[in-house]
Image (cartoon, rainbow, N blue to C red):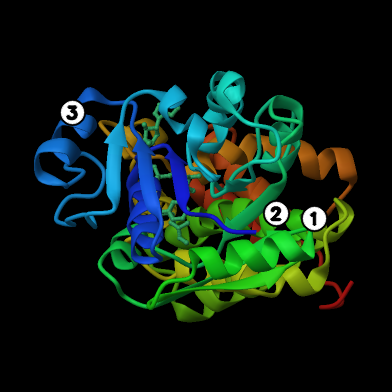
Amino acid sequence: MEFRTAGVIGAGAWGTALAQVAGWAGLDVLLQAREPEVVESLTARRVNELFLPDVVLDSRVSVTAVLADLAACDLILAVPPAQHMRSTLTAFAPHHRPGVPVVLCSKGIERGSLKLMTEVLAETLPAAPAAVLSGPSFAGEVARGLPSAVTLACADAALGQALMETLSAPTFRPYLASDLIGAEVGGAIKNVLAIACGISEGRGLGRSAHAALITRGFAEMTRLGVALGGQAGTVAGLCGLGDLVLTCSSPQSRNMSLGLALGQGQTVEQALAGKRSVAEGYESAPAVRELAEKTGVDMPISLAVADVLAGETTVPEMIEALLSRPLKAERS
Ligand SMILES: NC(=O)c1ccc[n+]([C@@H]2O[C@H](COP(=O)([O-])OP(=O)(O)OC[C@H]3O[C@@H](n4cnc5c(N)ncnc54)[C@H](O)[C@@H]3O)[C@@H](O)[C@H]2O)c1
Ligand SMILES: O=P(O)(O)OC[C@H](O)CO
């Protein structure tokens, strides 16, 4: 299996950073952007001024506005926001060649259907072998060549090995896994939990509360991952615990900074006003709440975040409710 060309669908911060990595990895890369100003700035100056300013892209990366141009690529990286994955892949379907693998790089759960991105892919491009790339990785750091490591999950061991080797670059290390569900659940839930950590930080609740939220949040993430058919060991890897630690620990995270603003007293509308960048936890939280109810999985922190985002409870009420839950065994 040899891949020489990669098509990247979605030129937000992460799609742009992954195009950079793929170029460093030696692939010829075609990056598809929706916004005319992104196409213009990448074409003219090799910089995505809207979503990833201050990073000059590798000369192996070209840009297009046209999805059909990616038809000849040997592999596809799909990087739209999760809520737009279905429409994006549906639009790409007429141009997808059967057997060309699609690496899902977005982190979220589809609202309404409650589906993971692999399920959305199976319904829109049934002839595409699937992989999931997920882990602790801020686009700006990755695109500037700071070191990072992620999970690359693929059910087909030979394809996974080939994709891992193809996408590795001197400062970007994918680690192979076979459990796509565990990888997806980790990436989706950490965004919701990062909002909780941001709220805690914004309210000045301290480092002890922060550590408790990460640890108890990780327990919720693991329970849901296992309930959906994933493996606890996968969730404990880069795609779950690793990403949870990163996203809950830095205001560089759009999710944590949304929580920070809420904790400091802003309304959801104020916190999101004027933002072009996606905070996936805001989008996924209602789906996570429904999924938890449907599967009977206990996810008090994620549900509390969903309630705050929906305006159904206030931040002080959320904190009070979490602190007054019945005492129980730590492992149950
Ligand atoms: N930014 C990061 O550091 C990072 C790292 C890892 C994973 N991710 C994940 O990558 C995914 C994309 O995030 P991002 O940070 O690249 O986005 P971004 O916030 O930088 O940019 C927004 C993106 O949404 C796209 N978009 C807006 N409306 C759309 C529509 N109707 N249809 C399709 N696309 C539309 C824009 O074209 C743009 O690509 C998310 O799931 C995110 O969780 C991001
Ligand atoms: O900025 P966030 O919160 O979307 O997080 C970005 C990445 O997912 C971190 O791994």
Q: Position of residue 17 (x, y in %)?
A: 34, 55
Label 1 within 8 A of ligand 1 by Cβ: no
Q: Secondary structure at mark 1?
A: helix
Q: CA distance from mark 3 to mark 2?
A: 33 Å
Task: In this rendered view, identify the residue nearer to me: 291 or 305.
Answer: 291
Q: Is residue 219 visible?
A: yes
Q: Secondary structure at mark 2?
A: helix
What residue do we see at 83% from left, 59% from top?
230
Q: Is residue 216 visible?
A: no
Residue 64 is labelled as none
Residue 224 is labelled as 1
In the depicted structure, whether residue 242 falls above or below residue 197: below
What residue do we see at 33% from left, 48% from top?
16
Q: In which quadrant of this rendering is ligand 2 seen? A: bottom left
Q: Are marks 1 and 2 in contact (CB under 8 Å)?
A: yes
Labels 3 and 1: the sequence-earlier one: 3
- Disc 2 residue type? Val
In the depicted structure, whether residue 174 falls above or below residue 255: below
The residue that mark 3 highlights is: 37
In the depicted structure, whether residue 318 falls above or below residue 116: below
Q: Please identify the quarter of the rendering in which residue 64 is found.
A: top left
Along the horizontal axis of the image, is 147 left or right of 47?
right
Q: CA distance from mark 3 to mark 1?
A: 40 Å
Along the horizontal axis of the image, is 30 left or right of 282?
left
Q: Are marks 3 and 2 in contact (CB under 8 Å)?
A: no
The residue that mark 2 highlights is: 185
